[in-house]
Image (tube, rainbow, N blue to C red):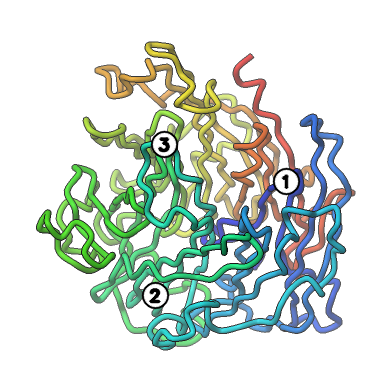
Amino acid sequence: MESHSSRTRWLHSTECFQYAAFYDARTSANASVRYVSIARRELSATKNLDGAGEWETLTLKDYAQTDDDGHNVISLGISSKTGSIHLGFDQHDNDLNYRVSKPGVATNPHNTTWSSAIFGPVVNVLPGLEGLDLPAHFENVTYPRFLSIPSPTEGSPSANPEADLLLEMRVGRAGLGDDWLYAYVPDEEGESGNWTLIGKYLEGVNNNAYINGLDFDLSRTLHTSWTYRDYINDTGQDVAVEAGPNGPENNHDLAYASSADLGNTWINSWGQIVSVLAEGANKSMGALEGPIDPDSPGITVFSIPKYGGILNQEAQTIDSAGRFHVLNRENTTGIEQWYHYWRTPSPQAFWVRSPLPLNIREDPNNVTGTPTVIGKRGKLVAVSSNSKFNDTALGEEETTYLLAILPSNAPNSTALSILAATSKTPALSAASTSYLAQFTDWSVVWSVANGSSPGTSAAEPLFDRYRLAQDGVLSLFLVSGVSGEDAMQSSAGSGNITVVDLDLSGLFN
């Protein structure tokens, strides 16, 4: 239950503190009951990996999680302006479960007593949106995910400039769901805030979209990619464990869209408007109102058939040069393999598709030879020799490392390997004739063997994107199954949670 790719925010850093959300088995005498726990630790101001503080944990015992369902994970978001911590949890086709802390908790951590008293009650509607049709927006909810919104920069679109937190979630069941977006807008004093509706941006038609994620680039443009799953009627426990017949075998295609105005207007890879949600926005351009649907033009970038091996909710990222990357898998050659799909920046945008090598000589775990159609999913991380693309001088060569964090899909394996591929390109000519040679030199930069240490991954690995952007440290959230000094106890039978810190600055030395 602990580590699931749909839950992208287990770990979140801000104001020199790091926060982790998990279910703690030690807090309940009943093995069938779990409570949400939130831990925090102070990070070293000097990026000394040994200088982080001890974990301090609070547990919210006013809500018992009882369903044995891997979808019912926790998502954590933080408002940078109000300092409030937002939680979405225990969601699989049920009423919204949301709660928020008092303001100032994350922006004034040294003066905050870390206890359950800082959180308000569980509510089933987002504050500020009580007037919405509740069944249409806040029932049958799955996969809530928060994403911090970057501040507008000079010349960037200014849609909803005060909003600093995004919430995305599916309403409706697998094969019959739609995806919605909401924005959290703090008040002028930064003492409280309310949610506003952006709208339904992905609509299923006898299917539903499973997104690989949501990511902002440096110009505040929002990018997403997804696969569709067609609907087949099923009931019972098979729904909870994805045992079929409505499982990943019905996934197909890789689709993509982006929005420069915080989800109000969406374009396809070729710059064509395919969806307008905001009243009056871009109507003069002849765009159709309403969400993206499976027939929206130009959204499919690679056609992958059902039973083609593509998995829902794997991984995506954006590098500092504006290249959009997706990690997923296919068996279209007869062998299930991880694939790297990537798009060059606009306006000369085009896509590249290449499999990860089945064998990498120096990888002791041979992870690229293990993927299965429903195996543990990986993550992508992009790190650059320039901390910000806008700081790159004209013509200066930029080195980007793309890291694939891959858990072994071999039976009962907890092995984990991190692979790296590079691209050295002039900053303003990423779409060069040498693009086919970019991100093909995969090698192992870190690995841990099956069952050998707290760094192993019995579940899907997750990471703290905000700490990575802040100080170049990759904090991995791992369910290891191995105890240790730094491990936090997860739900019964799931093993121990370990946060492993890796300093990536050595990549560029």
The local secondary structure at tag 3 comes to loop
Q: Is residue 338 shown to the viewer in this render?
A: no
Of the two numbered discs 2 and 1 on the same chain, state the one appearing first in sequence: 1
Front residue of 195 and 181: 195
The local secondary structure at tag 2 comes to loop
Q: Residue furthest front?
A: 189
Of the two numbered discs 1 and 3 on the same chain, state the one appearing first in sequence: 1
Q: Amino acid at mark 2?
A: Ala
Front residue of 279 and 353: 279
Residue that badge 1 annotates = 15
Residue at left 31%, top 65%? 201
Image quadrant occupied by the C terminus: top right
Q: Is residue 121 shown to the viewer in this render?
A: yes
Disc 2 packing (10 Å; few <14; some 14–19; many ≥20): many
Residue that badge 3 annotates = 154
Front residue of 162 and 438: 162
Dot in front, 3 or 2? 3
Q: Amino acid at mark 3?
A: Glu
Query: With 484 as the anchor, is 211 left or right in this view?
Result: left
Image quadrant assignment for residue 367: top right
Query: With 397 as the anchor, is 125 left or right in this view?
Result: right
Could you give the CA–CA distance between mark 2 and mark 1, rounded to whole angstroms? 38 Å
Query: With 371 as the anchor, is 56 left or right in this view?
Result: right
Residue that badge 2 annotates = 174
